[in-house]
Image (cartoon, rainbow, N blue to C red):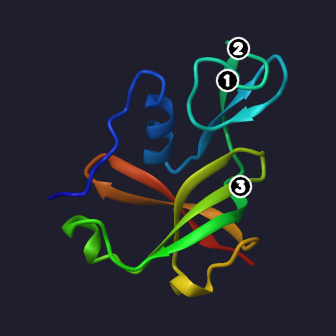
Amino acid sequence: MDRPIPHPTNISRTFWEGCRNGKLLIQKCRNCSYHTYFPAYACPNCLSSELDWIEASGRGAVYSATVVERGAGPAFEKEAPFVVALIELDEGPVMMSNVVGSPPYEVKIGDRVTVDFREVAEGVTLPVFRKSG
């Protein structure tokens, strides 16, 4: 089995194009200034449809993390052990991703991280995070 890859939709296409270009894009509400990730048609804070795409700082902190010891299927077995984490971006939204570049058991809640990008298939780039100073 190959690794599952995202299939952009009308609402998520801008996010995935940003990743391919090395930019972490999130939405910001023009009405209440709320930052949101996961791509949405309406602000989850005030329900306004006035959302703009902005480039996030790419910085945040590990909110929660787990080490996956055994990959779910052949596509992930060669990557194990790896870290799956919730990252609280400095702008506020929380997103799920991987923390790469550090021994898995050295990733802790509160660690500062910075976005990086990993191409997983031709034309498909995922945001991942690395521990930062």
Instruction: Identify the disc placed on residue 3.
Output: none
- Quadrant in the picture for the C terminus: bottom right
2 or 3: tag closer to the N-terminus? 2
Where is residue 21? Give x, y as percent. 47, 46
Separation of residues labelled 1 and 3 (CA atoms): 20 Å
Who's the residue at 79% across and 18% down the image? Answer: 46
Q: Residues within 10 Å of mark 2 (few under 14, many from 20)?
A: some
Where is residue 25? Give x, y as percent. 60, 40
Residue type, mark 2 in image? Glu
Nearest the camera: 23 or 104?
A: 104
**Is 36 situated left or right of 16 in this image?**
right
Residue type, mark 1 in image? Asp
**Location of mark 2 (residue):** 50
Image height check: is 130 above or below 103?
above
Separation of residues labelled 2 and 3 (CA atoms): 23 Å
Residue at the far top: name it: 49
Separation of residues labelled 1 and 2 (CA atoms): 7 Å
Who's the residue at 78% across and 45% down the image? Answer: 91
Element under disc 2: loop
**Location of mark 1 (residue):** 52
